[in-house]
Amino acid sequence: MKKTIILFALALLAARNVHADPGTLSVSPAVVMLKGVAGQSTTQSMTILNGSSVPLSFDMVARDVVVKNGKRTFVNAGELPGSVAATAVFSPKSLNVAPGEKRTVEVTVTLPPQPAARAVVALFQGTTKLQRNGTQVTASLGTLLTFALSDNGTAEASPLVVHAPTATTNLNVGQQLANGGSEPVLAQGMLAILNSAGTLVAKQAMTPRRLLPGEKLDMSAEYGGELQAGHYRALVTYVLQNNKTVTSGAEFDVR
């Protein structure tokens, strides 16, 4: 039985290592955020590192990334009208990567007049069969390319839910962030904790997240510091790449 393991490296600012028996693969950059207009082309370079002990082979393919029911899904190039992935041209189209070797591939994509998606994954699709738990598998990695056509990115947050700290648990806050607009957004969040006098007593940065149009993500933050007994207010603020902000808050007590 042959199985394909697609390990998309969609890390935040740098490549994320992924594991495929036997060894480690990584791709850089993991994400490229682009801004342009319909008809414009862009060429990007991607580098794959084979940290395994065996030579690996890859074919280069592109897939459109769309959102259905708030979650990302990958669509083969050309299946959608206005497919961005269908315009992808790779150089080279396939490659062999020796153990410990780095190889670079260039991809050129062109935005159609009415793009079907605002993101494409440029994929190193593995063709080398590996043994994993008695099953033949292949390992693939990709770079995510997102496209913004304007600065009108926006996001909305659900009510903030706060779980106050206890003797055995840390303060935890959570909510859902949704991109109801037409542009991809990068949301960088910060949790701030204010005491009853409105004084900032603690803050905690949140992991930046990217949201495609229509995408919904569960966001959370944990503060491990000690808070004295009293009444507090938790504020979470997301700053988008166009400097728009989304803020929500909720009160809680520490006993």
Image (spheres, helix red, strand yellow):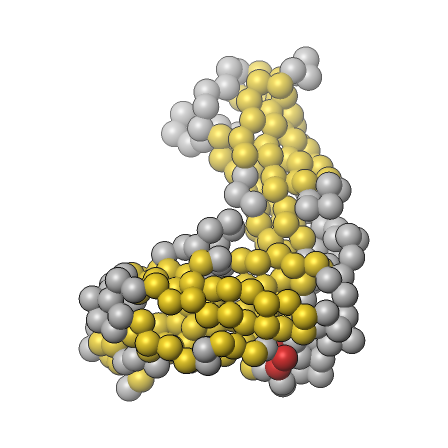
x%, y% of residue 10? 49, 59
Question: Which quadrant does the N terminus fall into?
Answer: bottom left
**At x 75% / y 42%, what residue is drawn?**
244
* 194 on left or right of 138: right
Q: Residue at x 68, y 40 (%)?
A: 239
Residue nearer the viewer, 42 or 227: 42
Side of 67 where 204 appears, left or right = left
Q: Is residue 244 above or below residue 212?
A: above
Q: Residue furthest top?
A: 197
| Residue 69 appears in the rendering | no
Q: Quadrant of residue 184?
A: bottom right
Q: Position of residue 133 (x, y in %)?
A: 22, 73
Q: Position of residue 156 (x, y in %)?
A: 72, 49
Please give the name of the residue rendered at 70% of the width and 72% of the height, measured from the top-left corner.
Answer: 111
The image position of residue 26, as x and y in percent, is 37, 60
Depth check, front residue: 197 or 17: 17
Q: Quadrant of residue 246?
A: top right
